[in-house]
Amino acid sequence: MSDSNFQRFVEVGRVVLLNSGPSAGKIAVIAEIIDHNRAIIDGPTTSVPRQSFPYRHLSLTPLRLTNLPRAAGSGVIRKQLEKESTVTKWENSSWAKKRAAAQKRRSLNDFARFEVMLAKKARRDVVRKALAKA
């Protein structure tokens, strides 16, 4: 039997990132699989209400809750999330940090973008001078 190339599976307990809807950008947990198009998700610690959600509007993350029973209620999911500190693991992941940085860049005004340009020029000058010495 050959090993699969896939590492992330749609499974109960999988932490997912929502890509659309009012909760876009938040994470939730798959509580139950409905069919090959939808799952019931719940995010009690990230204020995502329990709902049916299509797979095409979410991204599977590498994180998952271990030993989560099928169709677990919000209370069980909340306890498991807090016990495994999943939200903290997500916030410390490079994926979440990149999303936060992109969001911060999107929210800059014209003057802030100008300041960023000046900082980049200053850094570039320091690097160029250090390389010239070496």
Image: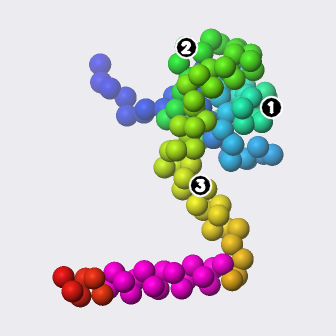
Q: Identify which amino acid the numbered label 1 is placed on.
A: Pro
Outermost left residue: 134
Q: Residues within 10 Å of mark 2 (few under 14, many from 20)?
A: few
Relative to 73, 3 lies left or right: left
Q: Disc 2 marks which residue? A: 67
In magenta stretch: residue 113 = yes
SS of the residue under disc 3:
helix
Residue contact between numbered discs 3 and 2, judged by CB atoms under 8 Å: no
Q: Who comes first in sequence, dot 1 or dot 3?
A: 1
- Image quarter of residue 46: top right
Which residue: 54% across, 85% down? 118
Question: From this viewpoint, is residue 35 visible?
Answer: no
- 117 or 33: nearer the eye? 117
Could you tell me how far apart the alpha carbons at marks 3 and 2 are, in whole angstroms? 29 Å
SS of the residue under disc 2:
loop
- Image quarter of residue 115: bottom right
- 2 or 118: nearer the eye? 118
Which of the image's four quarters has the C terminus? bottom left
Q: Residue 33: x, y in percent?
A: 66, 21
Which residue: 75% across, 20% down? 74
Q: Disc 3 marks which residue? A: 99
Which residue: 42% across, 33% down? 6
Q: What's the magenta region?
A: 112-128
Q: Disc 1 marks which residue? A: 49
Position of 12 relative to 87 (above/below)? above
